[in-house]
Image (spheres, helix red, strand yellow):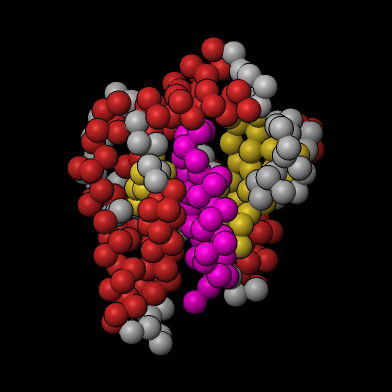
Amino acid sequence: MSGIVFIISAPSGSGKTTLTNELRRLVPNLEFSISYTTRAPRGSEQNGREYFFVSRAEFQKMIARGEFLEHAEVFGNYYGTARRFFAEAKAKGKDLLLDIDVQGARQIKQTMTDAVSIFVLPPSRETLEWRLRRRSQAEGGQSEEVIERRLHMAAKEIENYHHYDYLVVNDQLEQSTDELKAIVLFERIRRSSEGVSEAELASVRQLAERDRLENARDRVRGTLASFDVGPGPVVSAFEKQRSGE
């Protein structure tokens, strides 16, 4: 079976880019959708590699033409996922991986209720602040105001964690990558188990189920508390939507 959409969201500085790169290296038949954005390239970023960089006017024309599966404005810049990437991945018999924010994830789940959503959490607010400051130094330095704004935005994004199917805490890269890989493989097997042994299913199910929202909630309480985020609803809104409630 192909055509599964995997959504990965995370606050800026959570290591999501590194994780998705590792996931793409380890898991076959997984296409990555490169987002369009109106922001300027940072550091060594190249057009068509990290993002497609376009003008605000061109982005608005694409919106008017209905070319986006989802789009949102973040920190004054537009970001969006083109519809063509899903069609191209499905035509090639592949699944599609989306690296998008919580606004975009919500839009995708409204139209593709069977999409698989994964939220990547930093271990704590302190760890995220350290990562943001280290990245800021590598990029030539950002003002204290910008770093504080990103931390505030991270807390706002994390408040939406209960809208996701899976939670992964990115503490150790190898472990987090293994968890993402297990989630992708488990969802593939769950939807089409032809030719899969019980042993293969069990090997990925245990790791994937550990990160399901309802199972991971207690484990991430410390992380949530460090951002002053409460436990949230018992059942995610996306899960309710999926079950037709």
Compared to residue 145, the image places residue 6 above or below, namely: below
Can residue 120 be seen here? yes
Tally of numbered discs = 0
The residue at the point 48 percent across, 16 percent down is 148
Compared to residue 58, the image places residue 235 above or below, namely: below
Q: Is residue 176 left or right of residue 16?
A: left
Can residue 112 be seen here? no
Judge whether residue 11 is colored magenta: yes
Which is nearer the eye, 30 or 23?
A: 23
Which is nearer the eye, 193 or 200?
A: 200
Judge whether residue 167 is colored magenta: no
Q: Is residue 149 left or right of residue 77?
A: left
The residue at the point 26 percent across, 65 percent down is 206
Task: Write down the region rendered in magenta.
Answer: 1-30
Q: Residue furthest bottom?
A: 195
Compared to residue 110, the image places residue 37 above or below, namely: above
Residue 202 in picture, x, y percent from top left:
28, 73
The residue at the point 57 percent across, 29 percent down is 135
Residue 125 quadrant: top left
Compared to residue 93, the image places residue 12 above or below, namely: above
Residue 25 in picture, x, y percent from top left:
57, 62
Q: Is residue 44 left or right of residue 20?
A: right
Residue 151 in picture, x, y percent from top left:
45, 23
The residue at the point 56 percent across, 45 percent down is 17
